[in-house]
Image (tube, rainbow, N blue to C red):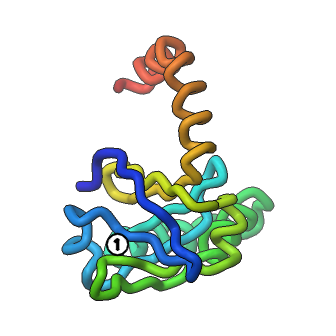
Amino acid sequence: MFIGEYSHNLDEKGRVAVPKKFRLDLASGAVVTRGLDNCLFLYTKKEWQKLAEKLANLPFAQANTRAFARLMLAGAMDVTIDKQGRIILPDYLRQYASLKKEIIVAGLYNRLELWDAKKWNEYKKKTELESNRIAEQMSELGV
């Protein structure tokens, strides 16, 4: 289970360290792809397989399902953790998420999200201000 918020730096070669506590879970390989809200999603191979199968089984006659599958699947890249615990983020994904130097790695149960620190702080501040309204909507969903 991935939880927590961690700050790491992106180096000049596009490498970012994976928090140490998550490296073992990702040791057998991982997949990074375009996420929502202009961040990147990082999945274990097992979690990625589950998501990819669901996406592949969506009705492709619907424009929204095609668009979402393209966003997630065409943008995906296999990554491996090097001996220093880093992964290389492809340039097109760094551009998509506007990643600069400081990166926030956020654990969200079955995936990690990689954010530009400035964008993460803006998003977090906005969400925190709306937390009561969000909580009410979530209660309608049984959470």
Residue type marked 1: Thr
Image position of 131 with respect to 80: above or below: above
Between residue 40 and residue 71, name the one nearer to us: 40
Q: Left or right: 78 with respect to 30?
A: right
In the rendered structure, the answer to whether residue 103 lies left or right of residue 5 reads right
- Residue 46, picture quadrant: bottom left
**Vertical side of 99 occupied by 12: above or below:** below
At 30% from the left and 62% from the top, the residue drawn is 19
Q: Position of residue 60 (x, y in %)?
A: 71, 69
State the image coordinates of residue 78 (x, y, percent, origin top left).
Answer: 48, 85
From the top left corner, tell me how far across and down residue 130 is, in percent.
Answer: 55, 17
Q: Quadrant of the N terminus?
A: bottom left
Residue position marked by numbered label 1 in the rendering: 44
Residue 62 rendering spot, x and y as whole percentages:
76, 61
Disc 1 element: strand
Whether residue 101 is situated above or below residue 118 in the rendered picture: below
